[in-house]
Image (cartoon, grey):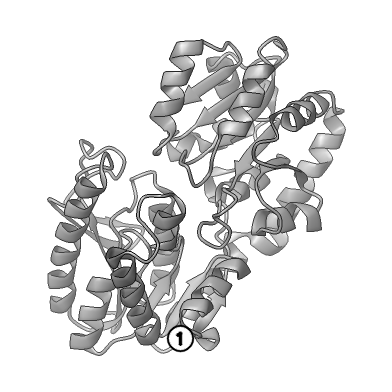
Amino acid sequence: MREKTLLVISQVYLPDPAAVGQYLHDVAVAMVERGFAVTVITSDRGYDDPTQRFAKHEIRDGVNIHRVGFSSTGKKTIATRLIGQFAFLFQATLRGLSIGKLAGVMISTSPPMAALAALVIHAVRRIPIKFWLMDLNPDQAVAMGKVRAGSLPVKMFDWLNRRLYRSAADVIVLDRFMAERVNAKLNIPSKITVLPTWPLETHLDPVAHELNPFRKAHGLLNKFVFMYSGNMSVASPLSTLLQAAMKLRDHPESTSCSSGEGWDAEKWRRYSREHKPTNITLLPYQPLEQLRYSLSAADVHMVTLGDNMVGIIHPCKVYGALAVARPILFCGPEPSHISELITDHKLGWQVRHGDVEGCVQKMLALAQTPTHDLQAMGQAGRELVANQLGKQQLGGRMGDVLARGL
């Protein structure tokens, strides 16, 4: 019998398609392989689609998963989100306090106030907290205009974060810009480890266009495909890319395909229904087992980051594109983690938000680029993943951080 149990608290977890849950499962499995018992407390409903129900209890790859009810009420309004989040955290705290042989608790940023549960369990059980910071709030809410900087909710959230930073044994952030923001709130450089996320490699072997059923199913044969795959929100604005794609509607040889959900997804669906562009396809999230086909259907992947989001969010979708050996067209600020990644390793191109005409010209030029040049750039990205940014390398370092002190 394993002597030490690591508790993971997350509102999302497999089989929910949200990326946070997928990454947490990778880490949980790695900790099981290191000899820990891992218990996950999560929601029994889908994060984006609360009508989707999951089993109350499951053992998946050696990970003991408990799903609690009344814990996901959808994302339509901030109020409905908060109700689900607090209901989830209350139940997770009670369960966490009763788990035997508990060695540590790990939280991420789903829900954003997971610190409440972790701090209570830490205080009562005297165990270390491991905090995996995937996006930074309340900074994100302020930058998106959802709350006012300096307001009481923001001050309370920042106070909670500082309590968490003081109490946590380790804080894992995704890039150096995020580390700078955390240290500006509370100077804790000795606790911070910078580790980007990794592509979900098990599902991301590249598929040649001529063998790809996804391209056939969605009318993409003999097309040059620009693809955006992931969360659609004001934090990762698509306006410049989609306006550029609209201007290319008279170029039938190229098309844009977006796959995902989020705050902006329905807005763009309404826009598409109104204007009926023949060169833009909007699709929902693709099942994990189909991801290699959908991502490989692209010739170039589009990645975006809001100008005011550097160090607040980290577009993990870039790693999936690299894993399937596709180059990147990045729309966002410089400097940023993505701009440095594609510049340092020659993995793609960059345009700025609002430069629709520049984006049009870049997309036209890319559609005329020789296939072997695009393939060479894509292969460089895949080799970078294999040598530096893969699950074996980054997941191993993550496991070292989590196991430390437990």
In-front residue for pair 308/259: 308
Q: Position of residue 183 (x, y in %)?
A: 52, 79
| Residue name at image x 56 percent, y 12 percent | 277
- Residue ID at (28%, 84%): 3
Q: Which residue is mark 1?
A: 404
- The quadrant in which the C terminus is found is bottom left
Q: Position of residue 321 (x, y in %)?
A: 64, 43
Task: Return the x and y of residue 392 as percentages of the image width and height.
Answer: 59, 64
Does the rendering let one see residue 399? no
For the point 41% across and 89% down, which residue is it?
405
Q: Amino acid at mark 1?
A: Arg
Left or right, 117 with reference to 14: left
In this picture, is 124 found above or below 232?
Answer: below
Quarter of the rendering occupied by the N terminus:
bottom left
- 194 w.r.t. 283: above or below: below
Q: Is residue 367 left or right of residue 229?
A: right
Disc 1 residue crowd, few under 14, some 14–19, many 20+, Cα 10 Å = few
Residue 252's quadrant in the figure? top right
Q: Is residue 291 visible?
A: yes
